[in-house]
Image (cartoon, rainbow, N blue to C red):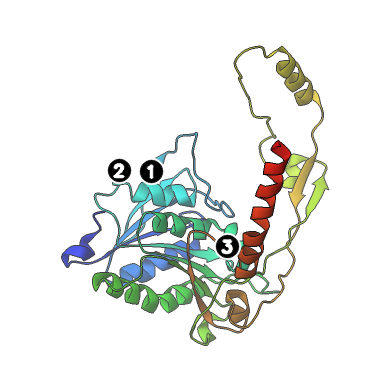
Amino acid sequence: MENGNGVSGGKPTVMVTNDDGIDAPGLRALVRALVSTNLFHVLVFAPDSERSAASHCVSWQRSVTVKKVDVPGATAFAISGTPADSTSLAISKKIFPSVPDLVVSGINLGCNCGYDIVYSGTVGGAREAFFHGIPSVAVSYDFYNMAGRKLNIDDFILSAEACMPIITAILAGIKNKTYPQNCFLNINVPRKVGNHKGYRLTRQGKCFYKMGWTQVTSEAQAGTTSSPRAMEIKPSGNTNGCTEESALSTKEEHLVFKLDTVETPAVDNDDTDYSSLQEGYITVTPLSALSPAEIDSVAFFKKWLPGVSQRFSSSLC
C-alpha cells in the first residue's frame, strides 16, 4: 500500500479522526498541535456529529455523504458515518491521493480502558487503520468523574502536547522500518495532565462501566428525536402469516428506555491501563485486532472439546 510523503523523504502524513465529531475540542486541539510543529502534512476525516460508543460499526447497507470542512492548517472532510467509516474511506484513495503514514484517533472526551475499549468509537477508528496495515493510535483524555470541575479546552491542548513525543517517535520508527506492524496503541491521558507522572506501558485491564436502564414516559424524556421502527423484511414465497404478525406488532404501544448514569469501574492490578491512569500516568497500551482468551481457558477447552465430539458421534449411532 502506497503511503504518504514520509516514505519518499518529505514530511510524513498524519490523518486525524475521532468519535466526538469533527468540531469536538479534542480533535481540534490535536490538529492544532500537529500543525504547529510544521513537521507533518495533516489530514482530517471525521464524523460530522458525535458517534460515541459506535465501536467498530460500519455503514454496511447505507450510503454516506462527505463534505469539505475548514480546519486551519489541515485538509479536512466530515462524513455522515462512523469513526471506522471515516478511516476506511480516508485510506481508500477515493478522497486523498495517498495513504497516510499514521492515523491518530482522538482526543476523546473520557478515558477508554479495560473492557470499555470494546464500546469505543475512538479505538474503532484506530483499529480500522490497523486492519489495513497502517500504524495507528487512539488517544483519550480522562475527563469524567471530575466532580465540580468544568471542561477546560486547555486540558485538551496539554493532552495533545503530551502525546506529541509518542507520535513523533512512532513516525521515526516507521521511517526507519523498526516500528512493529502487529499492534496499534491505545493512549489515555490522566485528569491532571499538567502534573502527569510520565508514560507507562500497560496492559488492557478488565474494568468496565456497568450500565443500567431506566424506563421513561416519552421519547422526549429519553433525549431521542425519532421513534423506534421495526425492520422491514420482505421475504419471498408465502408471507401471509408473517405479514399479519408484523402488522399486529407495530400497532402495540412501545416502551421507552434510556441508559442510566454509569457506575465507577473497579480498579484492576497496578500494571493495567485504568489503574495506572488513576495514578496519574499517561498509559500506553498495545492492542491487537482481537482479544484472545486467557491461557487457562484455552487449556480447559482443549480437554473439553474432544468430549463434546465423542458425545456427538455417539448420538449418531
Q: Which residue does the image show at 55% across and 51% down from the upper left?
A: 51
Q: Which residue is mark 1?
A: 67
Q: Is residue 295 above or below residue 16?
A: below
Q: Which residue is mark 2?
A: 94
3 or 1: tag closer to the N-terminus = 1
Which label sits in the foreground, 1 or 2? 2
The answer to whether residue 271 is left or right of residue 94 is right
Percent position of residue 24, x then y: 50, 59
* Looking at the image, residue 80 lies above or below residue 132: above
Taking 175 as reference, is 134 above or below it? above
Question: For residue 147, what is the image quadrant?
Answer: bottom right
Residue type, mark 2 in image: Lys
| Residues at marks 3 and 1 touching, judged by CB atoms closer than 8 Å | no
Side of 290 where 239 appears, left or right: right
Identify the residue at image location x=32%, y=67%.
35
Q: Mark 3 is on which residue type?
A: Ile
Q: Nearer the viewer, residue 160 or 263?
A: 263
Looking at the image, tell me whether mark 2 or mark 3 is earlier in sequence order: 2
Q: Secondary structure at mark 3?
A: helix
Q: Secondary structure at mark 2?
A: loop
Of circles 2 and 3, the one toward us is 3
**Whole-number angstrom distance, CA of label 1 to CA of label 2:** 13 Å
Residue named by callout 3: 117
| Residue at position x 41%, y 55% in the image | 131
